[in-house]
Image (spheres, rainbow, N blue to C red):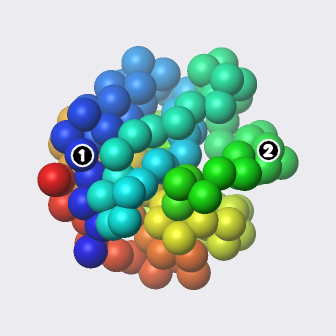
Amino acid sequence: MHRIRKEALEFMLGASRSLHPREFIGFLRAEGDLITEIIVPPAALYGHGFASHQEYLMPIDSTLIGSVHSHPSANNRPSQQDINFFAKGKLNLIIARPYQTINDIAAYDQAGKPVEIETA
Ligand SMILES: [Zn+2]
């Protein structure tokens, strides 16, 4: 079970809301099983979408355990492209519209299998 610090949760929900209908993308920084911070690659602020960021390397930083991105729809299931990208991280989050609470977020492991998350 991974937990998310409330500030990190609010940050990614807010970023998804403000970028809508463009996609937010970030990386998850963690201490153990606790996600403490969301790291945003500079190009992500322009909202070019998740697919166009897949060439970007996951930053070489052992505290980053995975990714988060938003979907402009209410569907937080991963596309095949998402699943291919998930292989690079241990935990991957998809945030669906309306980007309000943890219930709008689905979490997946490296293989694209759903996993549980909760607020810390
Ligand atoms: Zn996606």
Q: Position of residue 12 (x, y in %)?
A: 37, 35
Q: Establish if 67 lies above or below 83.
A: above
Q: Position of residue 94 (x, y in %)?
A: 44, 53
Amino acid, disc 1: Arg
| Residue 85 falls in image quadrant | bottom right
**Residue beneath the point at 53% across and 54% down:** 63
Q: Position of residue 6 (x, y in %)?
A: 20, 40
Which circle, 1 or 2, is nearer the viewer? 1
For residue 96, side relative to residue 117 (left or right) = right
For residue 33, side relative to residue 77 (left or right) = left
Q: Residues within 10 Å of mark 1 (few under 14, many from 20)?
A: some
Amino acid, disc 2: Tyr
Q: CA distance from mark 1 to mark 2?
A: 26 Å
Q: Position of residue 43 (x, y in %)?
A: 71, 25
**Residue at far right of view:** 55
For residue 35, side relative to residue 22 (left or right) = left
Considering the numbered disc 1 on the image, is that residue within a helix, a strand or a loop?
loop
Q: Establish if 74 lies above or below 10.
A: below
Which residue has dot 1 on it? 5
| Residue 37 falls in image quadrant | top left
Considering the numbered disc 2 on the image, is that residue within a helix, a strand or a loop?
loop
Which residue has dot 2 on it? 56
Q: In this view of the protein, which residue sits in the foreground, 115 or 79?
A: 115
**Callouts 1 and 2 close, C-beta under 8 Å:** no
Does residue 91 appear in the picture of this structure?
yes
